[in-house]
């Protein structure tokens, strides 16, 4: 078994929305290249459990300009991870300095990247369809039971369900 970060799911916390808003404002203020920030991921969907890590989607006009702002991002406490396995993305993480727990995952994409729509539509689809959101919660719990000490395996085990649901969400969102 691969060892990694422990997978801890928590009941939805309404404070996650406020936390996401504060981090978004901090990032937009500190990093001029970021033109918008959206709260995505499970913490943005009321009523379902989530790892208590805020996922933010940053939108930039230019990844080159964003890359030039690396020091500004790092000065806000984020660690720069680069593409981290996904071409066209920049990934930065914020960990609690005392506990080491992950607080925020920041995924940045250039305006027009299809990943932006995919992430936002997936979130909106789950919000609009509580029965699908509940199904996702069950998937998350099962995956957490299978991989309690490895967040990467946990994420990989949810991937097929997410990809199928993203396709449904994109169909739902298209006129």
Image (cartoon, rainbow, N blue to C red):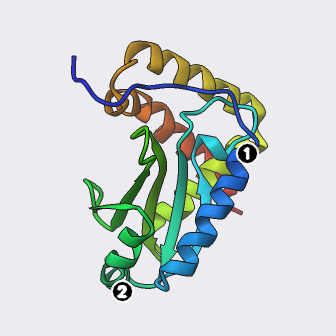
Q: Are marks 1 and 2 in contact (CB under 8 Å)?
A: no
Instruction: Say which residue appears at 46% left-offset and 59% top-offset.
Output: 106
Q: Which residue is mark 1?
A: 15
- Tell me if residue 122 comes above or below residue 69 in the rendering: above
Q: Farthest residue in the left direction?
A: 1
Q: Which residue is mark 2?
A: 65
> Who comes first in sequence, dot 1 or dot 2?
1
Q: Position of residue 77 (x, y in %)?
A: 41, 62
Instruction: Say which residue appears at 60% left-offset and 43% top-offset.
Output: 168
Between marks 1 and 2 in the image, the one whose residue lies nearer the viewer: 1
* Mark 1–mark 2 distance (CA, rounded to whole Å): 32 Å
Q: Position of residue 171 (x, y in %)?
A: 62, 51
Q: Can residue 172 be seen from the camera position used here?
A: no
Horizontal placement of 155 versus 38: left or right? Answer: left
Nearest to the observer: residue 18 or residue 141: 18
Q: Secondary structure at mark 2?
A: helix
Instruction: Say which residue appears at 29% left-offset and 29% top-offset.
Output: 4
- Tell me if residue 76 comes above or below residue 47 in the rendering: below
- Tell me if residue 74 comes above or below residue 124 in the rendering: below
Quadrant housing residue 6: top left
Instruction: Say which residue appears at 77% left-offset and 33% top-offset.
Output: 130
Q: Quadrant of the N terminus?
A: top left
Quadrant housing residue 86: bottom left
Q: Secondary structure at mark 1?
A: helix
Crowdedness of circle 1 by 10 Å Cα count: few (<14), some, many (20+)? Answer: few
Q: Position of residue 7 (x, y in %)?
A: 44, 26
Q: Can residue 104 be seen from the camera position used here?
A: yes
Nearest to the observer: residue 74 or residue 126: 74
């Amino acid at each position: 078994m691969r060892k990694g970060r422990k997978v801890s799911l928590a009941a939805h916390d309404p404070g996650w929305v406020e936390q996401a808003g504060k981090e978004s404002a901090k990032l937009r203020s500190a990093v001029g290249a970021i033109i918008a920030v959206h709260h995505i991921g499970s913490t943005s969907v009321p009523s379902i459990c989530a790892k208590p890590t805020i996922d933010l989607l940053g939108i930039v006009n230019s990844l080159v300009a964003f890359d030039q702002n690396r020091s500004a991002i790092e000065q806000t406490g984020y660690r720069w991870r680069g593409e981290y396995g996904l071409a066209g993305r920049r990934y930065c993480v914020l960990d609690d300095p005392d506990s080491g727990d992950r607080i925020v995952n920041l995924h940045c994409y250039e305006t027009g990247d299809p990943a932006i729509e995919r992430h936002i539509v997936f979130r909106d689809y789950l919000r609009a369809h509580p029965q699908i959101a509940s199904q996702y919660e069950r998937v998350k719990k099962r995956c957490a039971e299978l991989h309690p000490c490895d967040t990467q395996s946990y994420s990989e085990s949810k991937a097929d369900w997410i990809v199928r649901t993203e396709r449904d969400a994109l169909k739902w969102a298209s006129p």
